[in-house]
Image (tube, helix red, strand yellow):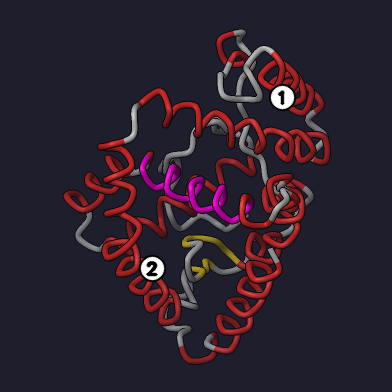
Amino acid sequence: MKIMTRLGSLALVAALAGCATTANNPQDPLEGFNRAMFSFNDTLDKVALKPVATAYRSWLPSFVQTGINNFFGNLGDVWSSVNGFLQGNVADGTSDVMRVAVNSTLGLGGLLDIGSEAGLQKHNKDFGQTLGKWGVGSGPYLVLPLFGSSNIRDAAALPVDFYGDIWSYKYPVRWRNTGSVVRLIDKRANLLDAGELLEDAALDKYEFVRDAYTQRRQSQIRGNSDDNDTGDKADKPAKTKPE
């Protein structure tokens, strides 16, 4: 967790340092740095993460994949509920608390998503979104090494999200690290189809991802999209004022 925090801080410093030399695009003043990080992340994904995720989806039984996804999703609902309350959304916060209670008990520790079957909607709220709800501006778009699309506000909020993730307190450390790797692979496996569509559709992958991320994030802050949608949506023009 400390490594993740330091990585986010270093990325912020590097981005700010590059601001003076990459201000050609007023909508993306850090574009030079961002494109370099995007290329780095894309190469890392192609040579390492995507092949592992493809094997994971191909060889691991689907019910095991579902259980893994549900388990970590249940852990994520804990922090999501906290952010729901911090955002003043008592209904969403309460719903997430109920999801955790139901899935942790009737759902065998979160392996089964009983909450969704019971009509309890899932919300993926984070501290960056909470800061946005409090009126903190996003700042420029920012691509973080390993983490991908973000902005200055959300990158600054990452350390809080790390500390809010209850899996980060799992001991022994070897189990925590193993679980974190499995969690990452599972997330990437769930995005394989979307990645293939992106490869086919986008003339400039960087611009497509940037605009989709920015639009979706704006929509989340304004409360115009479902928090349980983890895909990239384009509900509004890309050049609206960042939230």
Q: Nearer the viewer, residue 163 or 21?
A: 163
Give the residue displayed 62% in from the left and 16% down from the top: 107
Give the residue displayed 32% in from the left and 62% down from the top: 48
Q: Which label sits in the foreground, 2 or 1?
A: 1
The residue carrying pointer 1 sits among few (fewer than 14), some (14 to 19) or many (20 or more) residues within 10 Å by Cα, namely many
Q: Nearer the viewer, residue 134 or 35?
A: 35
Q: Nearer the viewer, residue 73 or 21?
A: 73
Question: Which of marks 1 and 2 precedes in the sequence?
Answer: 2
Above or below residue 117? Residue 164 is below
Q: Amino acid at mark 1?
A: Val
In screen coordinates, is 114 left or right of 159? left
Stretch in magenta: 176-189
Above or below residue 238? Residue 18 is below
SS type, badge 2? helix
Give the residue displayed 56% in from the left and 58% down from the top: 241
SS type, badge 1? helix
Name the residue beneath numbered marker 1.
100
In screen coordinates, is 140 left or right of 203? right
* Quadrant assignment for the C terminus: bottom right
Residue 169 located within the stretch drawn in magenta? no
Tell me residue 106's x, y (percent).
67, 12
Q: Amino acid at mark 2?
A: Asn
Tell me residue 165's x, y (percent).
71, 47
Name the residue beneath numbered marker 2.
41
Above or below residue 227? Residue 139 is below
